[in-house]
Amino acid sequence: MVSRRGFLQWMSALSVPDLVQHSCQAEAVREMVLSPMPENQRSTGATEASQWGCGNALIHIRIAGLESNFWSLENRETGKLCRFACPVFPIAGKSVVSALENLSIDRPAQLLSNGATEYSFRGNLVANPSLMLRLTFRIAPDNPVARFRYSLEANQSEAFVLSKADVPLTYISTSLAEKSWVREVRLSDFNLMLHSDTVSTTDIPFAWFTDRLAVAGPILLAGSTDSEVLLLAYEHGAQMPDTFLRFEFDPRRTVALAGVKGNYIPGQAMKVFETVWMEAAVSPAETVASHFRAFVRKYMELNGESRRPYLFYNTWNFQERNKWWNRKGYLTSYNQERILQEIDVAHRLGLEIFVMDTGWYVKTGDWEVNRERFPDGLRSIRARLDQYGMKLGLWFNPTMAAVSSNALARHRPCILSWKGTLAEPGDIWGSEASYPMCLVSEYADAYADTVIRVARDTGARYFIWDAVSQYGCDSPNHWHGTPTNSQDERSESYAFQLPLQLIRIAEKVKLAYPDAIFDFDITETGRAVGLSFLSAGRFFLINNGPYLADYDLPHTEGAQNDNLFFYPGPARTWICRQPLTYDEWIPSNLLLTHYFPDDPRSSQMVNIASLILGQNGIWGDLPGVSDAGVEWIAQVLRLYKQIRQDVAESDPIVTGNTAGVYEVREKISVASHRGLVALFSPTNGRIVYVTRHTPNRSFWATPDTRVRFDNQGRAVIESDMESGAAIVLFGVD
């Protein structure tokens, strides 16, 4: 056992001998160190200096199991190598440096459904041979990002206990002594001006190492003058400045990913402790974001259905307009006749997933179709959607169970509890009052089974999860602590486990229905935003944007709509396009955002030009859109469908500022030369733009836009911006 400071200083001072180079193989192979391992670098009790490896044509991973060289990641092209120290587990109040002996392949390499290969290795802890550590790596054939996690397991009948120690739970650590810059990429900075989570990038001064400061990430970059960049990331979620893991800096220029709170339940006996998934890559600076973006798009999730750039429609906006414009209830016109009308127009527009928002059910918890509104239990709606080749989507608040529901009767002990008091029931959009339920309890599996049943009975394959706040339960009777734990420990464990339980529920449903898609609504503060849920689905990023209260504007509660950007026109698109800064790291088609189809054409132009950048959502009053408007939107979307996969694959190129007089967004595939350019300006006047990439010479453009090609094959675009936006689609028929 060592102190945290002593461990990091000792780790950073060690060196590791050069390792033998070898050819890429498609399966895990054993590798031997050519020269004898110095005594001070061997795991105590190790009988041989052996290593195991895996990789692809771009990267090579060597697993040694040593304290300072637990495993290493090499870029095959440049030969750059990064070594990572072993994890440190707080076992029974002692900090155990988890060097390994008896390393072996745990199971044969497995080809996964997304095309990546999973490799698994195992070894016994030198400090406690009764404990085994499993290392799991997932490596794609064409990407330098390695996804990995650890699993600490008891080899024998007795369990082990994680509890606080001098050195907290440390997942991974490495030296950054040779790096000249360090940068944090945050994904959960909630910006009230936008009423949306946003990306923030911060350069870390080296004084932060001296002062032992920390950052949350979840992405950390470190580079040097040779432009080679180390990327570290972890899959969890929280709203900044809250965090459950963080990157901690040390004066010797080391960084360690450490658990801050909630990562385990102190004092709980367990047979298995599994870490969150993490990522590491060594890549040139100019491609690191592109590689990570491609990894998220293709290899983070096993089922590829959520990665397909479908076009979505959601009924909520008309429900909201019906209340505030027509002075009716949210559910007054929410019935079979109205939904069938909307489906007909959605089909004419070319939309593919039709989402019925809140109100389709009788009671939360049971989630049975409301037969008063939909007499045949959605059969007519499903038949119409099937006729058009469209998918059905449904809204859920997975944490709610109505007062008279069977779900509550069966799982009343799972009601959220705080300081010994059960939560009170509350209104759910005009339906029966409901109790908030704990998803870090047996209710999680009950809810998953309910979604499977709903999917079977209704044919729904898309599910939006709304209003899931990260905090709220400290019960000693659920899965996040016992009476022996403090209130803070139980509350933090609940908050830590919540996003992981959402993933587990989604994965359980997808075992029954692999084509199911899950969207996690992050439109409000206090939600678990990060990389974790992207392994199971997508984010529902923005609905209506800011409220009047966000801008300190007067409003009368209950008498007027609090939404600020609620009307057709360009203003709402400014808000919705701003978080496209995510697109550098997370593909925009994983950030569902809805745009308005309403007349006039100037509004349709700017909304559709925004939508085809990849957020792919529409909501509004579809039967109220003119025939001419429907035909024009349908034409653009028909052409967009020809290139939308290219758009999804393309890294974004942005010139100018959102809502500025010159805003241009280019999404052209380097490989296929297909894609688009969308231009925006609030004022009339000629805009000229030259594409960064060389596009396909077959194109379609809006009427006030002219395109020619220079001698380098780049497109020169000129537009008079008469409608506030212009579109050029390359590679369409």
Image: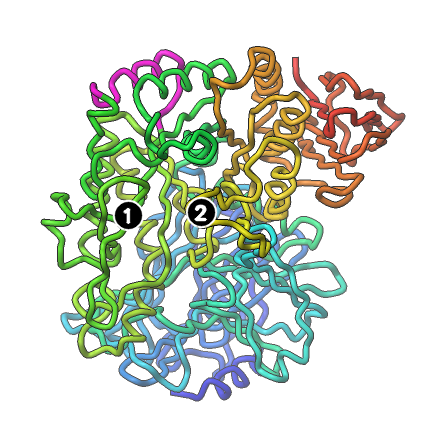
Along the line of sight, the residue nearer the viewer: 36 or 632? 632
Instruction: From the top left corner, tell me how far across and down residue 422 is, in percent.
Output: 20, 63
Q: Is mark 2 on a helix, strand or loop?
A: helix
Along the line of sight, the residue nearer the viewer: 275 or 496? 496
* Upstream in sequence: badge 2 or badge 1: 1
Q: Is mark 1 on a helix, strand or loop?
A: strand
Does any portion of residue 76 appear in the rendered image? Answer: yes
Q: Hey, what amino acid is under mark 1?
A: Asp
Which region shows up in magenta?
375-392
- Residue at 75% across, 36% down: 664
**Residue beneath label 2, please?**
534
Decide if residue 548 is on the left or right side of residue 49: right
Q: In this view, does 289 lie above or below 103?
A: above
Does any portion of residue 16 appear in the rendered image? Answer: no
Tell me, for residue 662, which label it has, or none. none
Instruction: From the top left corner, tell me how far across and down residue 442 is, in percent.
Output: 18, 54
Tell me, for residue 427, which label it has, or none. 1
